[in-house]
Image (tube, rainbow, N blue to C red):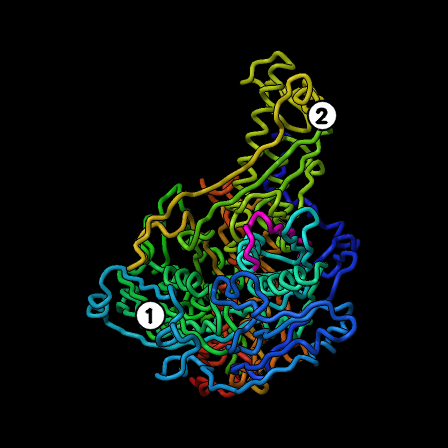
Amino acid sequence: MADSYVGKSCARVDGLEKVTGRARFGADLHFPDELVARVLRAPVPRASIANLDVSAALSLPGVAAAATAADVPGRNEMFGRFPVFAAGETRYSGDAIAAVAAEDERSAERALAAIRFEYRALPGVWTLDDASAPGLAVHADAGGNEVEAAYYPLRFGDAEAGFAEAELKLERSYSVGFQEHAYIENESVVVVPAPFHHGIEIYGCIQNPYTIRSNVAAVLGLSEGKVRVVTTAIGGSFGGKDESVMTMAARCAVLALKAGRPVRMDFSREDSFLESCKRHPFRMDYAAALGSDGTLRAVDARLVCQGGAYNNKARFSNWRAAVHAAGAYRVPHARADVSAKYTNTVYGGAFRGFSGPQVLFAVETLADEAASELGMNPKDFRLRNALREGDSIACGQVLKSGSIAAPLPRMIEDIARKTDFDRKWSSWPEENERSGDVKKGIGIAVNFRGAGLGGEGVDCSSAALSICRDGSVILFSGHTEMGQGMRTAHSQIAAEELGISIDKIDFRHSDTSATFDAGPTVASRGTQSGGRAVLDGARKLRERLLDAAEKKTGRPRSELSLSGNAARGADGAPLCSYEELVSYCYYPLGIDLSARGWYSPGLYEIDHRTQQGTCYQTYTFGVAVAEISVDTATGKVRADRISLAYELGKAINPQLAYGQLVGGLMQGLGYALFEELEEEEGVLRTRNFDDYLIPTTMDLPEIDLSIYESENPEGPYGAKGIGELGVELIAPCIGNALFHATGRRLRDLPFNLERVLLGAPLRRS
């Protein structure tokens, strides 16, 4: 097309409204006569609750409603065991036992103080060790504290045979803890009694509106059609604004129907830390069987995820962990068992990467340790074992040429050459011996990642497009813009297909009464899956416009095209403007210029007893090299330069892709070096950014990023999802560089000052 948008770094379509302050986030939205809601929590994480009485609170001036579990008209338990209000027992410190709605915050706080209840602290399951010990149970029906539907065995080849034939066997254990999402905007929800029927409308910073709709409808005992969910602008989510916003919306909905007035709830940062999900902690035991020639013969892994008090995500993230348990390596035999345990702590949930960062930290550290035991350059070890086209990954899926590109070996060689990896890896240890306290190190890590939901769930997507009489296009997506740039990418796809300028596209926020259920906006599928739905709808409209152009111009349909806001002939000359064509469609032709786009990849055939089958339609690949400095006197680690290479199909908007990958890098940097939640017997001590450290611009390393494009028949114009790809490699490549610099192999995250200083003795020549 003459004016192509796909593949160009167009300005964000929501950029102006955000920089000028016109964008409306959850806390910016207000309704007349609205009430303020607050929740009451027990003073200890696990407790029995008795004689709960809200009558004194209701008698106070300014208090319009109060609610407990007894006031829930429908089902008190939502998907994942999450209660609207804890009934009789709390299971973690974020549980609410009651909520109030009042005229203002002060009245709400007075009402909470007036609620009377008795509690008795109960013994809790605080750690994975506690969860595995006989006796205490977080849920009476969860034997052994096992999270239901979260056990996934991977079986590929014959692991016993692989270990039997190995010249070298390596066994290592790794662990990672909770990580907070640290989005800039706290959670905020407003629930309004529907003005024209018995139902409600929910507004706020909602990542997954259809999940909210189905769960809140069940809580209220209403049909889903009576619950409308509309998203506002969202100041980041990364998976975190899911269960916490769901419980907020449910509590506000109960209060709104009792009061007959709009009810809003805004979380403070402390509320957000206390109640929102975190990245799952994992304990990972790995064994590798190796040949003396450096080939990987077999991998055996036992991975245990800490689910927390309630969990509807370990059942999904653990499946991804099993599929990726052997890493981006060609291994003839692989065995893994992935499970999850309930604990009386803050719960694990969706977080950018969705078990990928945890598993990759273990796999890529293990790969480095294997190379070290073999006396190999870690780059060479990866080159020898990296997946190539034609290989089978550990779930038995073949990386077929023309279907799933696998350029990992070329990417490793390119980034090694660009970073001068071999020279630095061989010469820096000797240079470090002559230096002072500050040592330099270089480390490498590689990954592959299944794109989209895959066999994790139904990977369908929806979109709706309508061309107005003046030619402007209203575009709805079934997915949610959370700051990732999806509105821009979808607008580029629609503009490309219709041959119009992007300023004619008006992308609307998600609204469950105007869009079709596309499932959750997760798994980096906004562009790959959601973009396909936009493309489908836009193509339907393009065909109708071209049919009309044939009638209007008298030219054969085969000679016509749409580009540059015009219908054009075979020579590219304009025959009529886009606006004239639209007007002609409305009158005299009466052509429908609204279209629904839908995308479904179909069923994935997977044997979940072994995880063998087609797990994902396609995969993305990445390589990272970190160059760091370590002050051995203080333990401070600084990332000086990080070089990245990612294969992502087609970059719809290269600048947005760059931003996504660099944003992931910074979250991975925090995961590697800074971020740690302090918890003691279920009590979360870390509740704000005064003691939860995240990287700032002062920690930003020099970045070199290379993007590799390839054919991908599944995505729109070949695009793959990349939102989560950038976070996974950072911790392992920094850890590997740390070992290269100091000889200290750290197997637990983060690499904070204490761990760096108190690790294994410094390597000596």
Which residue is pictured at 56% across the width and 17% down the height?
Answer: 557
Q: Nearer the viewer, residue 81 or 743?
A: 81
Q: Which of marks 2 and 1 is in front?
A: 2
Closer-to-camera residue (101/580): 101
The verdict on residue 232 being magenta is yes
Residue type at numbered disc 2 = Glu
> Is residue 461 shown above or below 688?
above
C-alpha span from label 2 to label 1: 61 Å
Q: Please state which of residues 363 and 50 is positioned toward the viewer in this rendering.
A: 50
Locate residue 300: give its quadrant. bottom left
Q: Identify the residue at image location x=73%, y=61%.
A: 27
- Residue at the far top in the pictured view: 554
Front residue of 248/67: it is 67
Q: Which of marks 2 and 1 is nearer the N terminus?
A: 1
Residue contact at pointers 2 and 1, CB within 8 angstroms: no
| 703 in relation to 512, above or below | below
Q: Name the residue under label 1.
A: 301
> Could you say where residue 573 lies in the image, as x and y percent from the top left?
66, 20
Percent across and percent down for residue 728 are 49, 63
> Alpha-carbon neighbours of circle 1 within 10 Å: few (<14), some, or many (≥20)?
many
Asked whether residue 84 is drawn in magenta, I would say: no
As helix, strand or loop, the secondary structure at mark 1 comes to strand
The kind of secondary structure element at disc 2 is helix
Q: On the image, numbered disc 2 is attached to which residue?
A: 579
Q: Which residue is drawn at 78% across and 73% down?
A: 61
Q: Does the image show residue 424?
A: no
The range drawn in magenta is 220-234
